Amino acid sequence: MLSTLLDRYCRLLGIAMVACLAVMVVLVFGNVVMRYGFNSGFTLSEELSRWLFVWMTFLGAVVAVHERAHLGTDTLVSRLPVAGKKLCLGATYLLMLYLCWLLLRGAWQQTLINADATSAVMQVSMGILYASGVVFAVSAMVMLAGSLWRLLSGRMSEAELIGVHGDEA
């Protein structure tokens, strides 16, 4: 059930990332045309594009956590017995959960600190920009905790114990 819910959540994030990219392309292209063709421009273009890029990056990182698509190396772990692989993966999940906690705490503090500050052009709360870190940290923590639970309860296959996927060079 959690897996289906996370799959749908990541599909929704994928749609949001496509929307962010589409708006960024329209804003930047429109701004270029306005500057070179009409000697004017959209003042909103640069700031909003930067904000959308930050949000798109954090949302993409959430999807990458779900798909286990972040960079990694398996040179040592792939040679370990199953118990060693489980131990290393469990330690990795605990470290990632701790790092997400640190990111959550810092992003939350920055969101609160900047909630009353407004952006230069859009005049909206800067807290919205820093909230992207909160969304990432909470989402990643849920996914990592679910994977850790699957590992500890023995519901993770041996093939899933190696966190690196992809082509070997």
Image: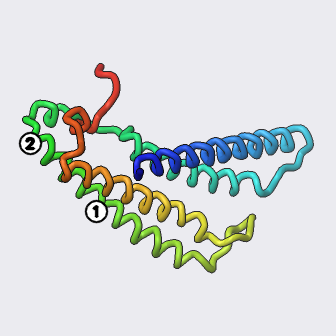
Q: Residue furthest right?
A: 38
- Reading the image, the residue beneath label 1 is 98
Inter-mark Cα distance, 1 to 2: 23 Å
Q: Residue at x 82, y 52 (%)?
A: 42
Q: What amino acid is at disc 2?
A: Ala
Q: Mark 1: which secondary structure?
A: helix
Name the amino acid type tagged 1. Tyr
Q: Mark 1 or mark 2, which has the lower sequence index?
A: 2
Left or right placement of residue 74 versus residue 23 in this view:
left
Image coordinates of residue 67 in percent, x first then y, are 40, 40
Q: How many marks?
A: 2
Residue 118: % across, % down: 67, 73
In-front residue for pair 162/128? 162
Q: Residue at x 41, y 67 (%)?
A: 104
Q: Position of residue 5 (x, y in %)?
A: 47, 51
Observer-nearest of 42 and 12: 12
Q: Where, by quadrant of the figure, is residue 19 drawn?
A: top right
Residue 158 vs 5, above or below: the answer is above
Residue for badge 2: 83
Residue 29's x, y, as percent?
A: 77, 39
Crowding at mark 2 (Cα within 10 Å: few <14, some 14-19, many 20+): few
* Numbered circle sitting on residue 151: none
